[in-house]
Image (cartoon, rainbow, N blue to C red):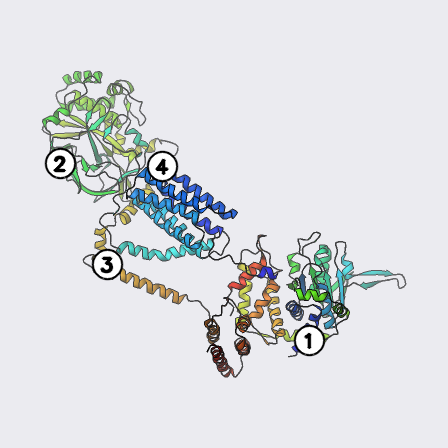
Amino acid sequence: MAKIMAKIKPSSYLLSSKQIFWILLSVTISVLPHIPRLPLWFPLLLIGVVLSRWLTAIKRSKPLPKALIVLITLSTFITIVYFQGFKLNREISVTILAAMTVLKILETWKKRDAWMVVTLCYFVILTRFFYSQDLLLVIYLLLSVLVITHTLFILQHDNKKDFLDKREIKQTLGLLATGLPLAVLFFLFFPRLGSPIWGSPDFFGSGKTGIGDSMSPGSISQLFNDDSTAFRATFNGNIPKNSDLYWRGPVLWDFDGKTWQTNQIQTSKNFSNFGRDKGTYVSYEVELEPTGQKYLFALDYVNRAPPDSTLKPDQQLITENDVNQLRHYSALSQLKTYNSNEILSPEDFARLKYLPPSFNPKTKALIQQWKRQVNSPLALIKKILTLFTTDEFYYSYSPPLLKGNTVDQFLFETKSGFCEHYASAFTVMMRAAGIPARVVTGYQGGILNKDYLLVKQSDAHAWAEVWIYQKGWLRVDPTAAVSPLRVEKGSQALISQNSRNWLDTSWSRKLGERYDAVRHNWNKWVRQYNAVKQKAIFKVIGFDSINGRSIIIVLGTIMVVTTLLVLLFLYINRPKRTESRYDKIYKKFTQLFVKQGLKIEENYGILEFSDHASQHFPRCKNSIHQFSTLYLKLRFAKTTNNQAKLDNRLVKIIIKIKKELHSKND
Amino acid sequence: MNNQLIHQAIDAVCTKLFDKKEQVEMSFACLLAGGHLLIEDKPGLGKTTLAGAISQVLGLTFKRIQLTSDMLPSDVLGVSIFQPSSADFKFFHGPIFTQLLLADELNRGTPRTQSALLEAMAEQQVSIDGQTHQLPSPFFVIATQNPTDDAGTFPLPDSQLDRFMVSTSLGYPSAEAEKKLYESEFLNEQKTNLSAIISDQQLNAMQKTITDIHASQEVKDYLHSLVLQTRDNKHFVNGLSPRAGLALFRLSQALAYIANRDFVIPEDVKNAFLPVASHRMRSLTTQQNPVFLLQTILDETRIP
């Protein structure tokens, strides 16, 4: 029994398997979101290191030889430099940070190393923000911060054996919750830079679909299945009716028989004719999700280009740089079907009438025949639209594939198509009649989600513009002739009529919209919090500008108040034990010996302590005995009358012991 | 306070059992607190010697039973036998009718026999054939138990372990003490009986004194916090019962008495904790020794 009772405490600096488990989890969870942009060998390195360290932990086997660790580290470093080049940029820094954090596991044997690795994890997970600040990532980050902080906690208190102990997690959550108000205050008041120092996050979704600068049959109908958000619009005032919501995107001029392209060198002039035509004005703000392209979307027709963008003569908004991160802009538009803001140059005029010579002969023949029957372009437009309405044309989001003379095939054989088929066919027919026309792509409609208009990729649309002499550009949407529902009620109305796949239910769409509303708020309140808004907050609390003085005052006040609060909290929750005068006397007594170099166990009772002290200081044996006997009597026996007198005696004994201790020392 | 007597008794027992003063004191404390004693140890370490010596110095009648797997309850309690001469049943008292009973290798007995014995321990009486026979007073049982992983044993159920106030183990003697055993004069000395030092009345009086020993609120708080921690600790199957808590309290009082104090100090509780708790607790996993866990509780509870 004595053997068992002997204290078996693990050496305090070695790591238990539970601690190692949490360290490995921290590293894995912080490196994981980087994996897609890290080199291909990285997951192998991670798995190998984590497995090997875990095996050494549970099997208590020998660690890898030092030479091997050095070799692995060096070769990793060389591999990174060889493949990514020796540059000091963001990519290589993040790769090296992640790789070295993972490799550090191999030599994590003591707590000191463990703290270093775990602290590094905070940095690793933070660097993920260089690339994206999306809500999902933030949720993931919060989770990993919980794990990493919990690991720090486990490193300090490794009491419970269970790897996942509810009470321990609770304590960690408590810790994080305590830090939260301070984090919020620092978010609000820490000086914000105008733009991120690390440059803009990359648009990280080359496989992502969206409206591009070209259009061929099928390119828009495939977007119909994509429920991801294209952009969000918040209107100042009422939201216009669905059939007025034509969000203008790339304008397509050039047709090669199959694909429509934008015109990069427009020679026409932009002539602001804003306000002279009829139409209601709407002002709104757009929050555009990253597209990786230069186009901004605005309602037809926009007044002026927002900052950092230009309005091309064909009324297309273009930014200087690709939209690689969430982009905000506000715009003022006038809702109208005619647009006289463009003065066409002769070159552009010719270009807008051009058709590839040998393509679509049947269509050309039909139009030549019709041209003789009507007397004005408007009448021709009407005739074509009537054809779409009366003949057996169908609106379909999975139309048959077209090859060769796409328009001929569509008009005379398949008669089934999505908006791009109709817009393309219509424009070709116009051009065949010698009338300038072009295709406009963008989005049409959107759904009201809470207080904003949510425009999804599935709202992508294409329509046509026809040049009417002396009037300007007339918007003609042939889709409206085939499927009025699409334009009047929006694509959502179509979707709810026939679901696109088994996952597509009104319930799942609602859920997606709810999530989008949360993201919208996240963007609005957190991501868009910038130096300008910070200045407004500083103004509210009485500072006209953000300068060194105001920052120091505000941050200093926060620090002082926080410190005071912490002190107050500690004072209120101070250990509730009655530190009686005997405790103090006893402390004095023990301190006498501690000062002389006596080491004591934490939980000695007084008798144990006295024995211990007597052994080391035999000269004081009698006094120690006197003290302990009297002390115990005073503290634990029934109270006696001459308590005060005895208390004094206790103090006297202490003085005596002190003398005895020092007499020998001299 | 005449605790002089108890120290004489302890010293006398120690002449037979060298080097085991701690355990002897604990055994006396247990008897003074009115509890039964369980000695868990391997054979040949002096359990019987201890029990015998205690009975001698206390002037108690002493009997010893060796439990085996074919023993019946009647072998312990006694049996009624028909007397042709008087045409009547006569009850023949079993070995249990004694003041101090040494039940050797308790866990070798079948559960039936064990429970017969343990019932008697709890009730201080034996009921056979509708007749109740009072057991003598004072009545102590010193039981010994082999480590349960030995073959052919029936581990005692928790409920019966709870009847023992204290468990202790003797362990191997020190080198000098063991060598002393080999000497011839010691052998002779060992054979001589000790004279009785404490009478029945004196023992009863001591037991009475012990229940009056003062414990301050601080000490009670400390004791209770220890008990509570055995209940809160999720590595144990169960916590200490209130009966065990009371046993801890009584044993602490008895230890204070032996230390010649009329008040309990926290260290009495600390010393009493393992002997009272260790046989009552079982840990959930076999890897964890309950004694180690209890020691951790002791280490982590601030002693006032």
Q: Is residue A96 left or right of residue B247?
A: left
Q: Are marks 1 and 4 on the same chain?
A: no
Chain for disc number 3: A
Name the disc covering residue A551, or none.
3
Q: Are marks 2 and 1 on the same chain?
A: no
Q: How many angstroms separate mark 3 from mark 2 (CA)?
A: 51 Å
Quarter holding residue A573: bottom left
Q: Which amino acid type is shown beneath numbered disc 1?
A: Gln
Chain for disc number 4: A
At 34% across and 49% down in the image, what residue appears? Answer: A123
Q: Of callouts 3 and 2, which one flags the residue occurring earlier in the amino acid sequence?
A: 2
Name the disc covering residue B8, or none.
1
Q: Is residue B60 left or right of residue A502?
A: right
Q: Which amino acid type is shown beneath numbered disc 3?
A: Ile
Q: How many angstroms separate mark 4 from mark 2 (CA)?
A: 38 Å
Contact, mark 1 vs mark 4 (Cβ under 8 Å): no
Which structural element holds mark 2? Answer: loop
